[in-house]
Image (cartoon, rainbow, N blue to C red):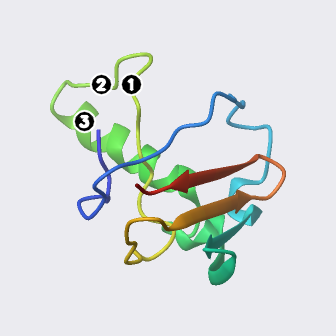
Amino acid sequence: MVADNASSAWFLMSDKAFFPNQFHWDQIPIIMKLNGVLVQEVVGSAVMGHPVRSVVELVRMLSRTGHYINPGTIVLTGGITEAIHVSHGDLITVEYGVLDTMSLFTK
């Protein structure tokens, strides 16, 4: 299910899992760097005021038609950062506060 990620060509997933009530998701800082240079800095509230809100809205829309989200389904909550242009050889690093840091090297 995709809430608002039509511009995404790829997405990365961490092997870490968290409980929905484990953090204040709207307050998690996100820092994106391109080749070590800061390009974006936002917090979780950039997604509809709270990232869980988009999932709640999706569940409501699906339930009106008798549908639901199957257990294990990947749900992207919506774009929290703007898309950036990357080229071959770029290194993108995104820090998600206490959650994780993820990096992608383009070839």
* Element class at badge 2: loop
At horizontal 37% and vertical 77% (from top left) the residue drawn is 85
User: What percent of the width, then of the height, locates residue 84?
Assistant: 41, 77
Residue 73, numbered circle: 1
User: What percent of the width, then of the height, locates residue 101?
Assistant: 72, 51
- Say if mark 2 contacts mark 3, CB within 8 Å: yes
Residue 104 higher or lower than 86, as above or below:
above
**Which circle, 1 or 2, is nearer the viewer?**
1
At horizontal 44% and vertical 45% (from top left) the residue drawn is 55
Residue 89, numbered circle: none
Q: Amino acid at mark 3?
A: Leu
Residue count near mark 3 (Cα–Cα under 10 Å), binned few <14, some 14–19, many ≥20:
few
Q: Amino acid at mark 2?
A: Tyr
Residue 68, numbered circle: 2
Residue 62, numbered circle: 3
Q: Residue 103 or 6: which is nearer the viewer?
A: 103
Q: Residue 1 or 58: which is nearer the viewer?
A: 1
Residue 42 higher or lower than 21, as above or below:
below
Q: Residue 67 or 20: which is nearer the viewer?
A: 20
Residue count near mark 1 (Cα–Cα under 10 Å), binned few <14, some 14–19, many ≥20:
few
Residue count near mark 2 (Cα–Cα under 10 Å), binned few <14, some 14–19, many ≥20:
few
Tag 3 or tag 2, which sits nearer the N-term?
Answer: 3
* Element class at badge 1: loop
Tag 3 or tag 1, which sits nearer the N-term?
Answer: 3
Q: CA distance from mark 1 to mark 2?
A: 10 Å
